Amino acid sequence: PPPFPPPRYHVTAQEGKEIFAGRNLQQPDVLHDHDAAGESKHGTLEDLHRDGVHATPLEGEELDGLLKGKESDFLFVDFYAPWCVWCQRLEPTWEKFAAVVDAAHAAEPPTMASTDVVKVDCEANSKYCGTQAIAAFPTLRMFHQGKKVGGDYKGDRTIEGLTKHVTDSYAALGMKVTDQGLKKGRKPPGGAAKAWVDDDHPGCRLTGSVWVSRVPGRIQIEAKSNFQDMNAKNTNVSHVVHHIGFGTSLNKRTMQKLNKVPEEYRTVSPMNGNVYKTDKLHTAHHHHLYVVPTKHLNPSDASLGERVLGTFVLARLSNFARAFTSPFSRSASFNYHQLSYQSQLIEFPEDKVPAVTFAYDFSPLEVTIQKESMPTYEFIVKMLALIGGTYTMFSLTERSVKAVSKKMR
């Protein structure tokens, strides 16, 4: 197992800064109004519809007209898909919640009179849901006078939880649920919209390490939820690779040594900082990494003791010098992994959620890098041999010249 669980963060960006909302190692459970057998506490839809439909079904154009015309102060919208099991579980609760809101309208004094509860089928209105960037089902979103209020609702799917979200939305705009609504065109206290809302720009950061065998494999990153079904049509898996590498992390001292290795032999993290953006729907990047184990050998595994002692001995004693000083040697060799990669954009079927894949393969061969150098004693011996040879050549030449000169005389 990895040395620590890989933490996942919900992050947002604001003015170039990342805001960490906290660790999200496990998604929290979302409560539903169901009994132990999984049946709705509010009965069937047929029972709930006996006095009429309360959660008004709208077409995309109808909702767009309401938002642009600002005919309702608050619109609480359920963007759903008929095939989504979570939407099916929510449907009775959503209908009951809409009935509670309608009853609150008729109460004395009336409450939530400025709120309407509606729903939109994203299968029948897929294009409109695409403009609303609906990435998962169900998506519960509050609007006020045509503008989104805060982030999408992610709390408990109970009557109490939904009612509290309405109350909190009123409070966020400086209102109370007993208010009878605002006049058309009037700005709500505190402003209806902000320049930037963190919850409107979510992202995920994944960091950690995993143990893998030295065989081909892959790491796949896919959007999933414990209480939503992903909308494959609008899932965007654009990403930035801050760092990816294989092997143990290199310490500072080793990195200093690695920086002295020629650049073509130290491609340990070539993907760092790369941005992979997908502008086309149903697409995701597939990365293939080729991992090459590499060993860097010290130019001389001998320590200072060998080099100093070797300086004063003859070449024929060099083996003795090595044997004498080997216990004091400190090898500076280290291992690391080089990477090469290729990336391509893969198109997915419309009904399949795109996923980012990092496929990897290990080279069966290990690359060994060694810088050849000459020990000091060997250099001195060779220099003495060169000087001796030169002296010998000059002596022979001088004798030959003298001998010829005598004969000429």
Image (cartoon, grey):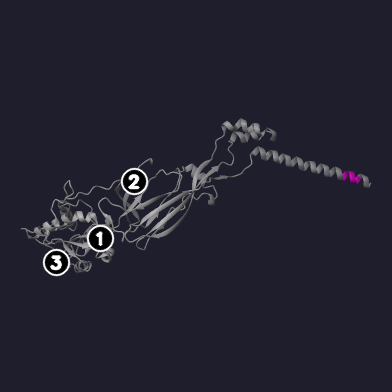
Position of residue 230 in the picture relative to residue 241 (left or right): left
Q: Secondary structure at mark 1?
A: loop
- Of callouts 3 and 1, the N-terminal one: 3
Q: Which residues are magenta?
A: 401-405
Position in image of residue 176 (x %, y %): 13, 57
- Of callouts 2 and 3, the N-terminal one: 2
Q: Nearer the viewer, residue 253 or 324?
A: 324
**Residue 359, magenta (yes or no):** no
Residue under circle 2?
A: 7
Kindly give the residue lying farthest to the right in the view shown. 409
Position in image of residue 292 (x %, y %): 50, 48
Q: Nearer the viewer, residue 352 or 273?
A: 352
Q: CA distance from mark 2 to mark 1?
A: 30 Å
Which residue is painted at 53% across and 49% down in the image? 265
The reply to whether dot 2 and dot 1 touch (C-beta < 8 Å) is: no
Which residue is painted at 54% across and 43% down in the image? 296
**Image-quadrant location for residue 65:** bottom left
Residue 151 visible somewhere in the drawing: no
- Checking the image for residue 194, the label placed there is 1
Which kind of residue does numbered mark 1 sit on?
Answer: Lys
Q: Residues within 10 Å of mark 2 (few under 14, many from 20)?
A: some
The reply to whether dot 3 and dot 1 touch (C-beta < 8 Å) is: no
Residue under circle 3?
A: 183
